[in-house]
Amino acid sequence: MPSTARHVAACCSTPAALCYWFVVSLIAWGALSLVGTAWSPLHAPSSAACLLAMAVGCFANWLRNRSYHCVITGPLFLIAGIVFLLSGARLVHLDTRWIWPGVLLGTSVALLLEWRFAQRSAS
């Protein structure tokens, strides 16, 4: 019995994929910022709103373009955004000054892994 599932390989980011990520992230940020008008931890310039929007962009980009690094950065941005959100809502008391360097390091590692292991397009 032949399998109908097909394997889709991860690939390197392209300018079109980056543009798609940016547009989806911008729309998600706008929606989260709208919620932030009623709930201050998600106000427009908050780290939580920015990171959660970036996570939405990464998940959408992975589903559409299979950008290798998005499978790493999506969860990274989501976790960091939730930590900032919980801290901003004063549900947890954490020192958040180390989150951005962790996000930067994780993103750098993801991009290096993409550069090293992802399939390059045939163009």
Image (cartoon, rainbow, N blue to C red):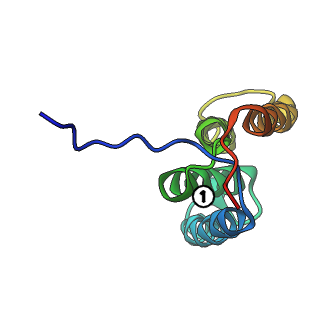
Who's the residue at 75% across and 51% down the image? 47
Q: In the rendered image of this protein, does residue 111 appear above or below residue 121?
A: above
Who's the residue at 74% across and 27% down the image? 94
Picture quadrant where residue 90 is located: top right
Q: In the rendered image of this protein, does residue 55 appear above or below residue 79?
A: below
Who's the residue at 54% across and 50% down the image? 62
Q: In the rendered image of this protein, does residue 95 appear above or below residue 17?
A: above
Q: In the rendered image of this protein, does residue 29 appear above or below residue 41?
A: below
Give the residue number, with chain letter if any, for mark 1: 57
Q: Along the line of sight, which residue is nearer the eye, 82 or 89?
A: 82
Please give the count of numbered marks on the rendered protein: 1
Q: What element carries label 1?
A: helix
Who's the residue at 70% across and 27% down the image? 93
In this rendering, position of residue 30 left or right of residue 102: left
Residue 122 in the image, given as x and y percentages of width and height? 67, 56
> Which quarter of the rendering shows the C terminus?
bottom right
Q: Which residue extends farthest left? A: 1
In this rendering, position of residue 14 left or right of residue 108: left
Residue 105 in the image, given as x and y percentages of width and height? 85, 32
